[in-house]
Amino acid sequence: MNRFKKIILNNGIPLYLCVDPTMKKVFVSYNLKYGSSGKWFVFNNNGIDYHVITGYAHYLEHLLGEHSKFGDMYRNFDKRFQSANAYTAMNETSYHFNGKDNIEKSLEELIVAIDTPVFNQKDVDATRHAIEEEAASYVDNTSYNLYGLLERNLYNGFELLDKTLSPIGNRETTKQITIDGLYDCYNAFYSNNKKYIIIGGNVDEKRIVDFLNNIYSKITPHNSNLILPEQDFDSIRSKSEIINGDLDIPKVGLGMKFKKNNSVSLRELYYVLYLIRNNLLESNELRDLEKKGVYDVVDFSYITLVNDYIDYCFGFVSKEKDTLISSILDLLSKRNISEKDYELAKKGLIATELRSMENKYNHLKNFPHSISLTEDYSECDFYQSIDYNRFMKIVSSLDFSNYTVGEVKKLKR
Amino acid sequence: MKPNKLKNNNGTYLYRDEGFNTFSIQLNFLASPDNRSAAILDVLSIYLLQCNQIYKTDDDISLRSRELYDMSINFTTKWNGKQKLFSLVADLISMDVIHDDYSKEAFEFIRDILEKPNFENEKMLEVSKRKLLSYIDLNLADYDQYAETLYTQTVLPVENMKYDYSVDKKYLEELVNSITLEDIKSEYENLIGNFINGLVLGNINEEQFNEFVKCINLTPTKCELDYSMDVKTSEGNIEIEKDCEQSYIFITYDFTELTNAELRILEWMLNSSIGLCYHTLREKYGLVYGAYANILFHQKKLYIYGETNISKKEKFIEAVDEIIKDLNNREIVEKYMAQAKEEIANDEYSLSESKKRLFRIINNRILQVYGNQDRDIVNKEIEDMKPEELMNKTKVLTKKNIFMVRSKSNE
């Protein structure tokens, strides 16, 4: 089993290094603990208050890579036969590439491009077109909108997602993004204490660490005096909301949130909820609801981390909203998982982890999604360490009353 | 990938790679291609996982697959020119990785799912039919899916390719609801006797592989695969107005004939991350977020697809014309061809790192795109190809039509 070695570089940025001689290519990602979530819309930096709209984190991700001091950084990587991309998630932004040769050259360009932005008004305007089209492509996606509605309505103290229900906003919000706002967000959030690097492959540890320290010695460290306001994560915005969508059969969603407490770590809570979710989706009781026509198809089931909360969001194709929601809540709150079912679900989870690790590049690419929970390369040992009694103790402490219901259906205009 | 790495036992091939944590199995059968049969196959593929002579309900099947390390098992259908392939696809955790030799139970489970159907359960047939209708409905709920399905059926209709589900829901419901247990039984009996070949790929040793082949005990039929297609492309542009935000545009071209090698170079020129679609449509003109070209090898068609705002429609059409012109610009073709050759050569190197990709390539080599042409020969042709050879083909590309599912907003 592979392991990460966590090395703190001279400037304080952590490097997660996975030396694996079986990998023919090297994977590199430069990551930031900052993403699309609305918890970063209001902030103070260097004594100045800011309130920005949705979409800035994603816009920055485009700009920094596509309009760097090396031009479009990804094109340079392509020319070296490296596969490169970036993504912005709710809690993180990640720039990554993998390739066989010229890794150090690309690594240096990646760090310099992200740490020394040069984008100007022309670049901001050029980027706007592509983002407008990207944002517009989600407008008619009913599953995406339903999931966004559930996440938005789970939080009332701030806008986790704004009214567009999309972490990247829509055409209109994209038009409102300004170069000043982009630099304000960059200065506040692209600080060294939010960054970390992941490298996996057949690399020499000393050489790569020396190389990184040398690159950073030529770059002025980026520190910010960021202060985030106290935000209320506990209250729910709305217990129920219906939005319009061009569907013959409505889509119905159930969103729930669970808070960690002193006796349960976030990692344990995530594991237990993941397992309960899988157990529900595999249960005979859920299939019975399908056979009775209470729902037709499970559209999605997501688990998301929002600070000290873990969100559960389910989507179904269903004409029987009330029966469906009360049945699912009943199934979840009964939580009578036998020891045999627990062991089976755990076996399934380990199989899922083994499948994920099979594509090492993808596994490394997705690591930022879970870094708030664990810094381990694999969760298999952790899963094995939790016995049935511990599992049931956590299950019995869960509160299923923090929920919201959403629906997408054809509304009369 | 060298062909001699493949081991063949009674029509089933093994490609072993210990770098994986899992192994995958695919068993391919030839099904009858007529229109009603396509719907029957779709119901059958769901029904076979609902009940069985051994496993009475889907709960029993689900429990058994969970006991076997969440083994996934599914049935899929795929068109291959004039024929239709029906495949069992399973994915298993490698016994060597978890140090638990559950191969006997796992292989027997696969065999039982495939060979011990129960065609007497009316209730499960109804559930299967409802599920199928829901899946189709769900797939078509989003406009991009809807547009693609409608485009395929309207502009590129291969005879009997798929029942016409997007156009007429009532027709679809009647078609699916008319299917009986006798229908799926007779379809099953027809295809189970037409085993074409199998593929086992991943971390499985030869002993386990041979055990699997012995367990399923299938003998391949001597059947020629027919890749030819008769396509009757509709003439004239088509615009369908819907209440959607974006407009979905497909621009179709005819070409006379391409070799496998030309196809691969052309695909790379158009679709790579620095390819002409991305470069021209997104980077140069900011018209789309994503766009791609699809080359339908056997249908001798090429189409370029993009999603954009309706106000940018004309600009999009002009930009696609520019892409087609660039395919005949010697300087551009030379530059891209050099990159493509190196990339394709490099691509070979990384094959063993992604099973999904490897599966597709081996499968294609045996079954689909490459037909009987050896991959090494194709690669040699790629290496030797001259720009003018490709330009001779692309200069005869003729625009056939523009198909669009468009928003109602004013231009």
Image (cartoon, coloured by chain):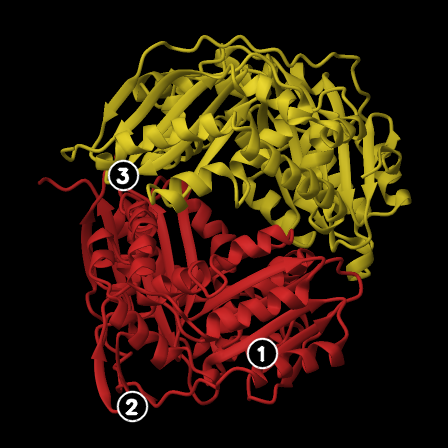
Chain colours: A red, B yellow
Name the mark on residue B309.
none
Q: Which residue has dot 2 on it?
A: A46
Q: Chain of mark 1?
A: A
Q: Which residue has dot 3 on it?
A: B246
Q: Chain of mark 2?
A: A
Q: Chain of mark 3?
A: B
Q: Give the total of numbered labels.
A: 3
Secondary structure of the residue carrying numbered label 1? helix
The amino acid pointed to by label 1 is Asn
Query: Residue A36 versus residue A183: which sits nearer the camera?
Result: A183
Q: Is residue B48 visible?
A: no
Q: Which residue has dot 1 on it?
A: A389
Task: Say few, some or many: other residues with alpha carbon within 10 Å of mark 1 (under 14 / 14 to 19 / 20 or more).
Answer: few
The residue lying at 31 percent from left, 74 percent from top is A183
Q: Nearer the viewer, mark 3 or mark 2?
A: 2
Left or right? Give the position of B258 relative to A85: right
Q: Where residue A406 appears, x then y in whole percent?
A: 25, 55
